[in-house]
Amino acid sequence: MPLRALAAALAIALMGCAHAGPRAQLGALGGAASGGLLAAAFGGNGEAIVASIILGGLVGGAVGDAMDQADRHYAYSNTQSALEFGPSGSTSDWCNVDSGHCGTTTPTGTYRASGRYCREYEETITIGGRTEWAYGRACRQPDGSWKIVN
């Protein structure tokens, strides 16, 4: 698929974010990027990648808009802890009793890249009874934190 068509599809998908709040915008951009990268990683053709970018942007925007600062703190802290201390296959969870939003992080594998320890993981976020799933990769930084590398 030509690059112009990909850019146009992404622009159309994200136009709805123009009037959304910053949480929705960040969620949409993150979802779009993750969707496109995941489709490409699994050998998707141009149409599959574009569709994944659009769907990822829509889902990410909805989740980003619904999560408040406390939710993001709980999710971030849980992911950092799970990646640092959780054995592969073990699930660590968080729940914000004020919002009712919950999530999980499950490390699925560990590897080394460029001299750093990296981990693959799966995450879920449940908002309003609806659960969204995501896959990610993160590498340990010199300061001990984990940075997403997808």
Image (spheres, rainbow, N blue to C red):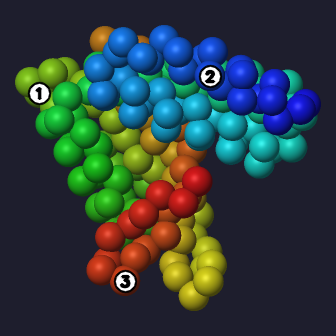
From the image, tell me which residue sits under label 2.
11
- On the rendered structure, is 126 left or right of 95? right
Q: Secondary structure at mark 2?
A: helix
- On the rendered structure, is 76 left or right of 47? left
Q: Amino acid at mark 1?
A: Val
From the image, tell me which residue sits under label 3.
142
Callout 2: 10 Å neighbours few (<14), some, many (20+)?
Answer: few
Give the Cα distance between marks 1 and 2. 36 Å
Callout 3: 10 Å neighbours few (<14), some, many (20+)?
Answer: few
Q: Amino acid at mark 2?
A: Ala
Is label 1 in contact with label 3 (beta carbons under 8 Å)? no
Q: Is residue 43 visible?
A: yes
Q: Which residue does the image show at 86% across and 43% down from the upper left? A: 43
Q: Which residue does the image show at 40% across and 76% down from the upper left? A: 141
The answer to whether 137 is drawn above or below residue 58 in the figure is: below
Name the N-terminal-most of marks 1 and 2: 2
Name the N-terminal-most of marks 1 and 3: 1
From the image, tell me which residue sits under label 1.
97
Q: Is residue 88 visible?
A: no
Q: Quadrant of the N terminus?
A: top right
The one of 115 and 125 positioned closer to us in this rendering: 115
The answer to whether 137 is drawn above or below residue 10 in the figure is: below
Is label 3 in contact with label 2 (beta carbons under 8 Å)? no
Q: Secondary structure at mark 3?
A: loop
Q: x, y percentage for residue 2?
A: 89, 32
